[in-house]
Amino acid sequence: MQRCQWAGKDELMKHYHDHEWGVPVHDERVLFEFLTLEGAQAGLSWLTILKKREHYRSSFYNFEPEKVATLSYSKIEELLSNSAIIKNRSKIESVISNSRLFLEVQKEYGSFNNYIWSFTNGKSLQNQWRSHQEIPAHTTESCNMSRELKKRGFKFVGPTICYAFMQAVGIVNDHTIDCFRYKDISKN
């Protein structure tokens, strides 16, 4: 079975590739989860984040933004001593501040989904890459998304992080054309 090269041989990575990556997501909680995890990945490997994903879920109320928005300073200090997640104050604080901004976007647009998918006019962009070397680190759309999220005050949302987010939640299909998931994802 041919997969995208980045999936490698690790079972966790292969499972993520085969079942999640690139599948269009419209669930608010899942969108917030991926926005958080992609920000946590900055400077790290995706495998590192996947291994800590369940701990992130338990530490941040399963990524329910309403609950995360209520976290206190004492909870931040507690999370900074939790080796099961990335112990980076800026990243932890950004989860809380981003949750509050996420809720503001929901109020303004009816849902975060409506807002975030508007960067591609509500459609999944279908690329046709022959190899992983062709896949860009960022695009015009991810730069626009990054700029607009930053204007709203979101943190850890640079163009590359936004592009990884877009790939993860299926706003863009970057499975290579020889990957067994390419055709399935392009039908969504």
Image (tube, grey):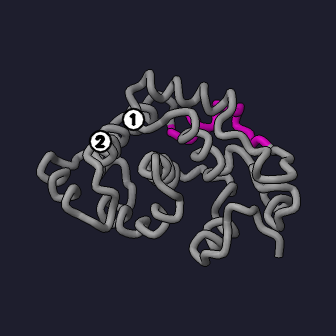
Q: Is residue 28 visible to the viewer in this orientation of the structure? A: no
Question: Whole-percent x and y of residue 73?
Answer: 14, 46
Query: Within the magenta stretch, is there residue 116?
Result: yes
Quadrant in which residue 62 is drawn: bottom left
Taking the spot 60% from the left edge, 25% from the top edge, the residue there is 144
Classify residue 161 by image quadrant: top right
Front one among 44 and 146: 44
- Mark nearer the N terminus (2 vs 1): 2
- Stretch of the chain drawn in magenta: 111-125
Examine the rendered structure and indicate whether residue 23 appears above or below residue 2: above
Residue topped by disc 1: 155
Horizontal arrangement in the rendering, residue 44 relative to residue 184 (left or right): left
Q: Which mark is residue 2?
A: none
Dot 1: within a 10 Å radius of its alpha carbon, few (fewer than 14), some, or many (20 or more) residues? some
The front one of 12 and 60 is 12
Camera-side residue of 164 and 103:
164
Q: Measuring 60% from the left and 28% from the top, which residue is drawn there?
A: 143
Q: Nearer the viewer, mark 2 or mark 1?
A: 2
- In percent of width and height, residue 94 lies at 33, 41
Most common SS among magenta residues = helix
Location of mark 2 (residue): 90
Q: Nearer the viewer, residue 64 or 39?
A: 39
Q: In terms of secondary structure, where does tag 1 sit?
A: loop
Decide: is 121 above or below 70.
above
Q: CA distance from mark 2 to mark 1?
A: 9 Å
Kind of residue sitting beneath label 2? Ser
Contact, mark 2 vs mark 1 (Cβ under 8 Å)? yes
Q: Residue at x 86, y 47 (%)?
A: 128
